[in-house]
Image: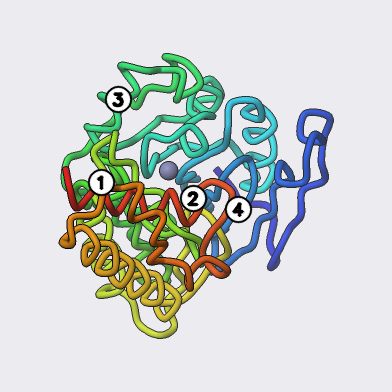
Amino acid sequence: MKRLITGAAFLFAAGTTLAQSDDTNLEATEVAPGIYHIVGGGGNFTLQSGDEYNVLYDNGMPPYSDAVVDKVTELAGDSIDFVVNTHVHGDHTGANAAFAGAGSYVVAHENLRKRLVEDPANAGGAEGIPVVTFNDALTFHINGIEAHVFHSATAHTDGDAIIEFRGLNVIYAGDIWFNYVFPYIDLDQGGTVSGFIAAQKKIIALADEDTVILPGHGPAGTRADLQAAVDMLEDAENRVEALVVEGMTADEVVEANPLADYHDTWSWSFISTERMTRTLYRELTE
Ligand SMILES: [Zn+2]
């Protein structure tokens, strides 16, 4: 549980398991004392490391689980005591079983646990199913700070958690925020666009201009960056809604391409402009 490494940033060298592509390197940046923004392994995750306990918020994809455990343990200087999941997707929960096998307790919202009970593969196996759950919120009182883990309903999924590191002015948004790309809103697992925007606005309300906000995908950002994401999504929804009101089908809305001028900045391999448009259409019509 003791942190041995100090400094600003680390780039983990690729091991044999991690050497398959560039994004399997784990790059860690200390954004506040003991708080590391880690990029790689499929998505982002956040390490809270200190003299008392180590807590890891999210983790990586199953093919790299053991390597992620090794590298995060190396960074923390000791084993990870608690693993908290912000949502049920495999790029954030897939190494649960590997961490549990190394002695971590897995913690998550009760809806997330229900989904992993149904499909333990997303936890890397049944061993990765959370052993501690919460409904509204829980707080870790460790390493001299409060890490407030709170739920926001029906946002990215129906089991989301956001973490406010009180006193450090850092917030980990999980996949409530994709920094400067179109967001994935998982309508099939309880997410909604309205709940997603509401959750983003909760984070903005907690932040000031100096707050470091860590997204589930993309680089660390600021309140202004997150506000830009909210502004984009609200405007995009309004544009699609105007066409829905005209009676257009989903294909007709895609053909009209109301998000065309967002494409260059926000479209990416997973959530293209068409997919974002269809998500908004579905939200507005189902
Ligand atoms: Zn996700």
Q: Helix or strand or loop: what does disc 2 sit on?
A: loop
N-terminal of the pair, mark 3 or mark 1, is 3
Image coordinates of residue 135 in percent, x first then y, are 17, 40
Q: Quadrant of residue 36?
A: bottom right
In-front residue for pair 32/13: 13
Q: Residue 151 carries which label?
A: none
Q: How crowded is mark 3: few (under 14 residues within 10 Å), some or many (20 or more)?
A: some
- Residues at marks 2 and 3, CA–CA distance in whole angstroms: 23 Å
Q: Which of marks 2 and 3 is nearer the N terminus?
A: 3
**Quadrant of the displayed image that contains ligand 1:** top left
- Per the rendering, the mark at residue 271 is 2
The reply to whether callout 4 and callout 3 are in contact (CB within 8 Å) is no
Name the quarter where the N terminus is drawn. top right
**What colour scheme has been applied to the protein in the rendered image?**
rainbow
**Closer mark to the observer between disc 2 and disc 1:** 1
* Distance Cα–Cα, label 4 vs label 1: 33 Å
Is 75 displayed left or right of 124 in the figure?
A: right
Identify the mark nearer the N-term, 2 or 1.
2
- The CA span between labels 2 and 1 is 15 Å
Residue placed under numbered mark 1 in the picture: 282
Which residue does the numbered mark 4 point to in the structure image?
38
For image coordinates 69% across by 54% down, the residue present is 27
User: On residue 115, which mark appears?
Assistant: 3
